[in-house]
Amino acid sequence: MNQPDSTYNIPLKYRKMENLHIVFWLLKDVSWCMVWKPLGIAMIFPTLIISIIIAWRTRQYFSEICHNLAITIWISANSYWMISEFMGFDTHPLWGNYTMKHLALIPFLMGLSILMYYYLYWKPRHQDVVETM
């Protein structure tokens, strides 16, 4: 639905923070891939903190808060998985064929659940609400 104020603008200072967030995220994942443990673990904090700030700043738009919360939860799951590999407990048995790294499935599924709620329940029932997605 076209409404007069249907444009979503991101202030430049927020956009710069979002772009820096991508740099931190990539450094974290490259460090994981290269097994640079100190840098990988250090990059968890700015990556996670900025994702929380982004989620907070976009909370007025339900679509944005859902996606940004899912990203924050994803980064948490991804960080746990990386730490489990770095510390060598990723292959420790948990239950049946599941190992300690599979605990990352809990937050991954939480993030997916948020997005499923948004796309399958909320969005179809709120088609008149101007959103960013």
Image (cartoon, grey):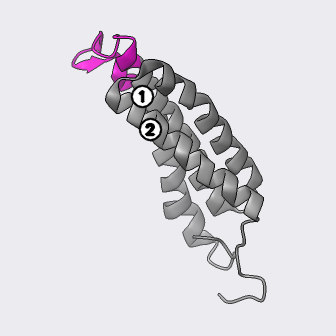
Q: Quadrant of residue 129?
A: bottom right
* Amino acid type shown at disc 2: Phe
Q: Where is residue 76 in the image (x, y as percent from the top left)?
A: 53, 32
Instruction: Tell me where the magenta segment starts and ends, as one range.
Output: 84-104
Residue placed under numbered mark 2 in the picture? 108
- Please tell me how crowded label 1 is: few (under 14), some (14-19), or many (20+) other residues with Cα within 10 Å: some
- In the picture, the disc for residue 122 is none
Residue drawn at x 60%, y 54% is: 19
22 vs 109: above or below: below
Residue drawn at x 72%, y 81% is: 6
| Residues under numbered marks 1 and 2 in contact, where contact means CB atoms less than 8 Å apart | yes
Residue placed under numbered mark 1 in the picture? 104
90 vs 118: above or below: above
* Amino acid type shown at disc 1: Ala
Q: Position of residue 3 (x, y in %)?
A: 74, 88
Q: In which quarter of the image is residue 73?
A: top right
Residue drawn at x 68%, y 49% is: 55
Residue placed furthest toward the left: 97
Mark 1 → mark 2, Cα distance in angstroms: 6 Å
Residue 74 visible: no
